[in-house]
Structures are given as C-alpha cells and as structure tokens.
Image: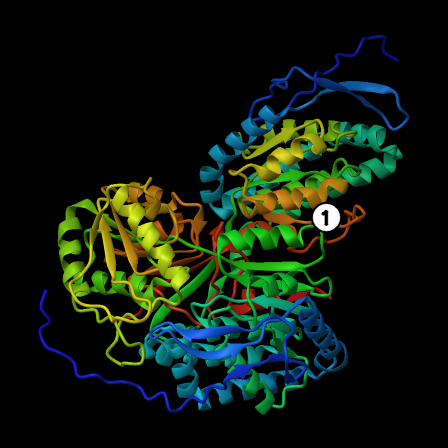
C-alpha cells in the first residue's frame, strides 16, 4: 500500500534531558555506589548506550531496607497524615512541572512513541500521586475500620513497559498509606526512576522513605525475599509472579501481583466498524503491544470478519513505525533484543502452526529493535499465538458465531486481566461484561486507565488490585 | 427409659448433592473426646477430592450468577434448618469437643447465627466493595466484586461446628463453590451439616464435604488447576507447603494464624475478600 501523503519529520528535542554517564543507587536520600557489576541501559531505537547503571547486591538491598525501616519507624510512620499527603502533592506537582523532560527520557530509555509518554505515561503518573495524596489523611474511610495501619516496608518490583507509570502505581499508594518503599526498576528502563529520585530530593521527602535499587532479576529477588520487607508488590510475567508467590509462602508478607494477559477483544456484528478498528489498533499496537492488558486476541463475529479485517489492514497500512521521538510515530522500538527475539520466535511458531500472517508494506529503520504491526488470521484456539502472551505488536484473530461462543472462547485462557466488547447494544454489552472472567472490561473503548479505577486480574493474571480505594487497601491492615 | 435399640447412621461424604462412600472404600474410626468409639467416617481419597472439584466447578455457573437476594435466602434457609436440628448438633459437638451441654449448645447457636449474618451479606458486598469510579474522562466506570470460583476449604481441626461454619459460610456468601475438608478427629458435625445443606435449597455441588485427612487431601487440592482459592484454616504445619504448592497456579490463599482463632469474634469481611475478584467496566459517555 502506498502512503497517501508523506509526513515531514517532527522530532521532539532531546536537549531537554541531561543523562549522567553513570548512576548509583538511591538509598537513604542519597545516590550511593552499588556493589554489583554495573549494567548499561540502551536506547532501543538506536542501540546507543545511554548510561551506566549500578547493580544492587544483597548487601545493597539490605542497606536500602534498613533505611526504609528506619524512615518508617522514626519519620514517615509517626508523621501527621496530612503532611504525608502534602509531600505527595509536591511530588505530583514536580512531576507535572518536569513532564516533558520525563516524557523524553522515558521515550529514549524505553522506545515508546513520544506522544504516548507525553500524553499517557507521565500525566497518569502525576495523576496517581495527586489522587493518592488526597487519601493520606482520609484512611479511616478506606473500609478497614478506624485508624488502619500501614504494613511497614514495601518491596516493589516493576516492569519495563511503563517504567514511570508503574513506579507511580506502586509508590503513591504505598506512601499515602504510610509505608516506606524499596523499589527495583526494570533492568532495561531505570532512567525515569532515577530522575524520580531527584524529584524526591527536590520535594524534601525525608531520606529513606523512597529507596531505588537498580539491577536485574537477582536484585529483585533480594528485595522480595528480604526478611524485613512486609509487603511485596510485583508487576511482570506470570512465571516470575509464581516464583514470588512461592517465595513469600509461609511468611507474613502481603502480596499483590499484576501479571500477564491474553485479552479477548470481542467485535459483534452490530459494532460500528471504523470505531471498532480504532479500538483494535489501540488495543494491540499501543506501546508496541508491550501491555499486559493488550487486546491480543481479536474475536470477531463471523459475519463481519472479512469487512473488519479488510478495514483493519487498511488502517494498519497507515501506522508509522520508527523514531520514537518523532511526534508522527505510532509504533516505536521494541524495548530490548531479548523481547524482539521472543516476539520473532512466537510469530515463527504462529506461521509454523498454520496461521496466516499479514504485515503492512514499508521499511523499518536499519538500527535498533523493530517489529512491524502484525495480524494473524485463521488462528485456532489451540495455537500458541492464541494462548501465549507475545507482548508485542502481534494480533491473533479468531471468529465466533454466537455470544455464548464468544464468551466461551474469551474465557478459554489461563489469564484473566482484561477484555474488550464492541457492540451498539447496551443489554448485550452488560450481559457479556458480566460473563467475562477478566478484571477490566472495556466496552466500546480499550486501554483506558485512571488512578480512581481498580486494575488487576482474575486467574493467573495475578491477585489484588491497583488504583482506587481497593488498590490503597492493599497497603493497609486493620488496626 | 425406653429399651428400644437405636438406629445408627452410616456417615458418608457429600459430593454433588449426593452422599457417596469414599471410592477408595476406606473408613476410619471416630471417637469422642474420651476416646470411646462413636462411628466410622469415610476416609476420602485423591479421587474423591477430584470428583468434589468437578462437582464444585459444575455448580459454580449457577451459584455465582444466582441473584444475591436468592443466595441470601438460601443461606438463611440453612440457618433455619440447622436450628431445627440444634439438639443433634449439640450432642455431636459436646461429644467430639468434650464440652458441657451448655457450652456445646452455645457453639451451635453461634454457628446458626453466623449463617444468618452471612446470609445478610450477599446483597451488600457489591455496594460496600464496589461502586462507580470518577475517572478523568468521558467514561462511565464501575467496579463490582465477583466470586473467584472453586475454593478448597480446610476446616479448623478443633472447632468442629462453629469453626467449620465460620469458614464455609463466607465462601458460599461470595458466590464461590466449596470443597470442604472437615476436621480429621471431629468430622461428625460436618457430616450432619452436609445433611442440612442437602435439605436447604443449596444446589448440589455448591458445597462438597470430604471427611478424612486434610494432610492427605490438601496437597492435591492445593495444586489442582481447577481450584481457584484455598483457605488454610485447618492445614496446621502443612500450611507453608500448601501455600507454595498453590503458587503454581496462583491460587487465592487465605493463610491461617499459628493458633486456631476465637471463632466467636466478629469476622468482618476478612474471610470473604480473599475469594472475591474485582471487575471494572468502562464505557464511553457520548451522544
């Protein structure tokens, strides 16, 4: 397909960010050296090394947990709740003030389009702090009786797909409830968390309330398994989630897990096709499909299959893959070589199992990690690409004839994080929404998030919720 | 005193609304608190546990989609029928737990009242735990609690009736279905309760009772892929191993305190929320 017209490049300037050649661990209010062998973080769009990142060892994690414990006992726990709230309001404002800087840095480190980091990730991160700031002095109303108590030290491990936003989802409720935090950012995307450490300093947040320990899986394991951590919150793969659930078994640690998904996005024959196609695109190609709640299984009613797929392919032909800093870009870089290899492997399996692959024409940049938006038709429910989370811009299309069949196929998954419904009929939407075994159901929309709205999965997509009163409750216990 | 010879009862399992013996053919002796023989109870096997899970899964669709009002009435009906058999329960509790008649009767009364309490919760959970969310955009967004699915309940080992009801009733109130493993040494109140359930409009399969050994059956239930949650109340020293095993399928786990708690205390929502999911639904607002 030829493009109707060409866009002139519209790059966002990267001069707004100032990346240091190396970063230490943020422990007890200061940047300190890590004892592990440093790793490098890379711009996945160019493979340029952005910075050298300290790696926290068991001893470093222990130091961070001790700082968090001390801050919990002496400062953050005893503090007037309204003052805790004021610190969080400060952080929300500081994030808003430096929003563009965070957006550019996120795009450099993660590879996501600047329009998404600018319009979704960073504003939502600030909103999470603003929302939870208001809770800090109203905890009697969360539904755990009068004067509920924080757990103590929260150990939090977050993924690379929404680095700053996941930080906000974890840190804001923890602090509002009166806990202190040891956070382990993802190995490939630590930079916005380290810039957030500077925000904590500028907010005069007491030392030790937030500690950020960078590193890879071993560092995360040390955080989760540290005996003086009271609350564990993890977002990431179901496989690691199971390891964590096993590791905390028999302890008093309270656990929240946000894990994988394989969401069904169900299109009924009465749905307006153009709107549904926009929703399908938003569902699977948002953030390169690196979204646990991505609408990666399209269930389309048989009678409109050909029309929907033709329209979808036409729309996919207009998606622009390339420089994440370009404001015209729709699909940015795949976050890492490892993830690109996994996507390629599963796509190869999809072809080998007999599904029909389609990608739009067009060139990909020579350097960096890229994958074209991809749709598989003729997919059977038994295919790996219909069951496994690809975590990339790859859509699997299945069909159904009746609403009952749609529900049965949608629920035929070990996951249960999210789902989509496209229909003009209100009673049908409510009926299908009732029957879907998924924690978030988007009807005639997809991939919407808000700090007031609980998010989290059924089945092996994890347990516990983030956002809203329920999300906050996970950081509190009855007194 | 009458010289009529009593008709004794054969105690069996309760699976899918029926009262089978263990497929294994095994039984074990149940004694009273002083060690005297009382009855033989069925010793449930791994296959009985799997049958119970199948029955519970089969009943889940109907029970979880029954109206909250209907579930409340059914649970209240359990209290009504139980009240009518209070004397029998009191005898079994007194014998099994070695309590005085008055204390046993108090435990039975508390157990009946607990059903009433949970019966009243069914149609209030959604308004207490759910609601609309004021999102920053043109969307109507609401959250509702929904039952997790099939829950394995390892009943307390000591409190054979009040403890048992205190772990079973909340699971049923949420809309989950249950596979219950009774106290090993004190199973008789559980078996009598299953007869109450069978005559209280509780659909077959909603609650299934296995007598025998939680130590033997627990591991199968903890790793069973079609079990969504597990209450470790009666797991004892096996609790940690069972929790590790449950992690393999990311079950919802309700841990047990080191010592069996005081079951007369107000339980709040703590035994229901672990087996409730939250579903959040978004829809655009526009013309």
Query: What colour scheme has been applied to the protein in the rendered image?
Result: rainbow
Q: Residue at x 71, y 83 (%)?
A: A79
Density class for disc 1 (Cα within 10 Å; few <14, some 14-19, many ≥20) is some
Q: Nearer the viewer, residue B50 or A312?
A: A312
Residue B191 point in image, percent of width and height? 69, 27
Q: Nearer the viewer, residue A334 or A441?
A: A334
Residue B273 point in image, percent of width and height? 60, 54
Q: Quadrant of the C terminus of chain B?
A: bottom left
What is the residue that sits farthest to the front in this orientation?
A: A37
Q: Residue at x 42, y 74 (%)?
A: A42
Q: Quadrant of the N terminus of chain B?
A: top right
Where on the picture, by quarter, is residue A364? bottom left
Q: Which residue is mark 1?
A: B256
Residue B24 point in image, percent of width and height? 63, 17
* Secondary structure beneath label 1: loop
Q: Nearer the viewer, residue B108 or A51?
A: A51
Where on the picture, by quarter, is residue B195? top right
Q: Residue at x 53, y 34 (%)?
A: B56
């Amino acid at each position: 397909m030829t493009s109707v017209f060409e866009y002139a490049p519209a790059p966002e300037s990267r001069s707004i960010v100032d990346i240091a050649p190396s970063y230490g661990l943020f422990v007890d209010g200061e940047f300190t050296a890590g004892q592990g062998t440093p790793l490098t973080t890379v711009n996945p769009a160019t493979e340029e090394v952005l910075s050298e990142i300290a790696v926290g060892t068991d001893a470093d994690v222990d130091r961070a947990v001790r700082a968090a414990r001390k801050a919990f006992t002496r400062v953050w726990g005893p503090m007037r709740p309204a003052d805790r709230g004021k610190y969080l309001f400060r952080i929300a404002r500081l994030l808003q003030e430096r929003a563009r800087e965070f957006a550019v840095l996120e795009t450099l480190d993660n590879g996501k389009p600047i329009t998404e980091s600018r319009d979704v990730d960073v504003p939502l991160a600030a909103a999470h702090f603003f929302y939870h700031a208001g809770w800090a002095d109203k905890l009697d109303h969360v539904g755990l009786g009068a004067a509920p108590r924080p757990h103590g030290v929260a150990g939090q491990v977050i993924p690379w797909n929404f680095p700053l936003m996941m930080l906000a989802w974890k840190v804001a409720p923890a602090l509002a409830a009166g806990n202190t935090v040891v956070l382990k950012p993802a190995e490939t995307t630590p930079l916005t968390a380290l810039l957030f450490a500077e925000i904590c300093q500028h907010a005069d947040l007491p030392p030790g309330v937030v500690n950020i320990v960078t590193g890879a899986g071993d560092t995360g394991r040390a955080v989760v398994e540290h005996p003086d951590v009271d609350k564990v919150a993890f977002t990431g793969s179901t496989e690691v989630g199971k390891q964590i659930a096993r590791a905390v078994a028999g302890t008093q640690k309270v656990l929240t897990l946000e894990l994988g998904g394989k969401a069904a996005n169900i299109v009924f024959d009465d749905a307006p096709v153009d709107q549904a196609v926009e929703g399908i695109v938003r569902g699977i190609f948002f953030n390169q499909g690196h979204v646990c709640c991505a609408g990666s299984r399209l269930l389309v009613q048989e009678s409109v299959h050909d029309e929907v797929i033709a329209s979808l392919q036409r729309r996919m032909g207009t998606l622009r893959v390339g420089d994440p800093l370009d404001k015209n870009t729709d699909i940015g870089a795949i976050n890492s070589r490892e993830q690109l290899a996994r996507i390629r492997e599963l796509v190869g399996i999809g072809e080998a199992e007999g599904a029909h692959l389609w990608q739009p024409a067009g060139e990909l940049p020579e350097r960096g990690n890229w994958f074209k938006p991809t749709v598989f038709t003729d997919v059977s429910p038994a295919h790996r690409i219909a069951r496994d989370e690809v975590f990339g811009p790859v859509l699997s299309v299945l069909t159904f004839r009746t609403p009952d069949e749609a529900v049965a196929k949608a629920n035929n998954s070990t996951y249960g994080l999210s789902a989509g419904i496209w229909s003009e009929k209100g009673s049908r939407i409510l009926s299908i929404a009732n029957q879907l075994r998924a924690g978030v159901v988007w009807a005639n929309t997809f991939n919407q998030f808000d700090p007031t709205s609980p998010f989290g999965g059924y089945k092996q997509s994890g347990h516990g919720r983030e956002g809203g009163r329920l999300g906050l409750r996970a950081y509190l216990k009855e007194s | 005193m009458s010289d009529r010879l009593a008709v004794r009862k054969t105690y069996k399992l309760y699976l899918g609304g029926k009262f089978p013996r263990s497929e294994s053919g095994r039984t074990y002796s149940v004694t009273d608190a002083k060690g005297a023989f009382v009855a033989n109870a069925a010793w449930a096997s791994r296959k009985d546990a799997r049958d119970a899970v199948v029955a519970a899964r089969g009943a889940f669709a109907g029970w979880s989609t029954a109206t909250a009002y209907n579930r409340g009435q059914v649970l209240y009906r359990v209290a009504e029928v139980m009240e009518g058999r209070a004397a029998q329960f009191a005898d079994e509790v007194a014998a099994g737990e070695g309590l005085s008649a008055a204390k046993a009767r108090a435990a039975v009364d508390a157990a009946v009242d607990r059903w009433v309490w949970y019966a009243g919760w069914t149609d209030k959970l959604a308004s207490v735990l759910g609601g609309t969310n004021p999102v920053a955009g043109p969307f109507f967004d609401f959250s509702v609690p929904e039952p997790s699915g099939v829950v394995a309940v390892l009943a307390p080992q000591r409190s054979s009736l009040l403890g048992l009801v205190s772990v079973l009733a909340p699971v049923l109130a949420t809309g989950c279905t249950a596979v219950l493993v009774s106290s090993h040494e004190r199973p008789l109140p559980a078996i009598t309760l299953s007869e109450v359930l069978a005559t209280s409009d509780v659909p077959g399969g909603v609650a299934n009772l296995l007598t025998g050994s939680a130590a033997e059956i627990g591991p199968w239930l903890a790793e069973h892929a079609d079990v969504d949650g597990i209450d470790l109340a009666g797991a004892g020293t096996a609790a940690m191993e069972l929790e590790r095993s449950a992690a393999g399928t990311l079950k919802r786990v309700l841990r047990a305190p080191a010592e069996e708690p005081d079951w007369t205390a107000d339980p709040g929502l703590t035994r229901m929320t672990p087996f409730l999911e939250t579903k959040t639904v978004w829809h655009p607002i526009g013309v």
